Image (cartoon, grey):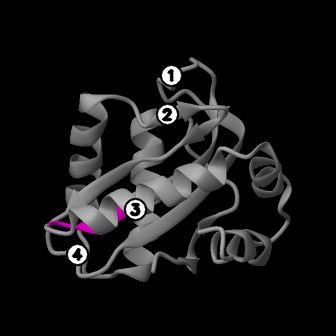
Amino acid sequence: MLTLGHQCIILEMQSTGKDEALRELASAVQTCCGDIDPDMLVNVLQEREQVGSTGVGNGVAIPHAKVPGLNRPVLCFGRSSAGISFEAIDNRPVHLFVQILSPTGRADEYLRSLARVSQLLKHEANRRILMQATDKQQILDLFNSDQL
């Protein structure tokens, strides 16, 4: 089951650009998975972004990658009130980031995770909750509900 941990939530990202945002999210992942090299993680995420932006529109990006050496799926959430240019498909700034990292060799789980997160974020009400949340618990409640 894919869950979001308290330490993998950034209530207000400091990043102003795409690469900086990927690095900030990678740093948060290192907090909960200390054995992951953040530089390697940023490289893997940047390689994935070269295939096509994970900015899916409506102010949302879902950066995702299969990560060598990872032993379980990891979810990380970040929010930017100002918005970050992320080459999203609708050319609008991204405010909500959900990073999905999956161990290599677990394609089914990886695809299910992407589908669940996409389903959650396609609903405007859920995006509004995430933008207006004043503490991490509200974000945890949404992501760790039955919806995900």
Comparing 107 with 84, the one in front is 107
Residue at numbered disc 1? 89
Q: Which residue is located at x 58 percent, y 19 percent? A: 90
- What amino acid is labelled 2 in the image? Gly
Q: Are the residues at dot 3 and dot 2 in contact (C-beta closer than 8 Å)?
A: no
Q: Separation of disc 2 and disc 4 at Cα?
A: 24 Å
Write down the quadrant of residue 108 in the picture: bottom left
Q: Are the residues at dot 1 and dot 2 in contact (C-beta closer than 8 Å)?
A: yes
Q: Separation of disc 1 and disc 3 at Cα?
A: 22 Å
Residue at numbered disc 4? 70
- What amino acid is labelled 4 in the image? Leu
Residues in magenta, as a range: 100-104
Within-10-Å neighbours for mark 1: few <14, some 14–19, many 20+: some
Residue at numbered disc 2? 55
Residue at numbered disc 3? 112
Q: Which residue is located at x 64 percent, y 77 percent? A: 144
Looking at marks 2 and 4 on the same chain, the residue that comes earlier in the sequence is marked by 2
SS under mark 2: strand
- The total of numbered circles placed on residues is 4
Comparing 13 with 129, the one in front is 129
- What amino acid is labelled 1 in the image? Ile
Looking at marks 4 and 1 on the same chain, the residue that comes earlier in the sequence is marked by 4
Write down the quadrant of residue 95 in the picture: top right
Looking at marks 3 and 2 on the same chain, the residue that comes earlier in the sequence is marked by 2
x then y, percent, for residue 69? 15, 74
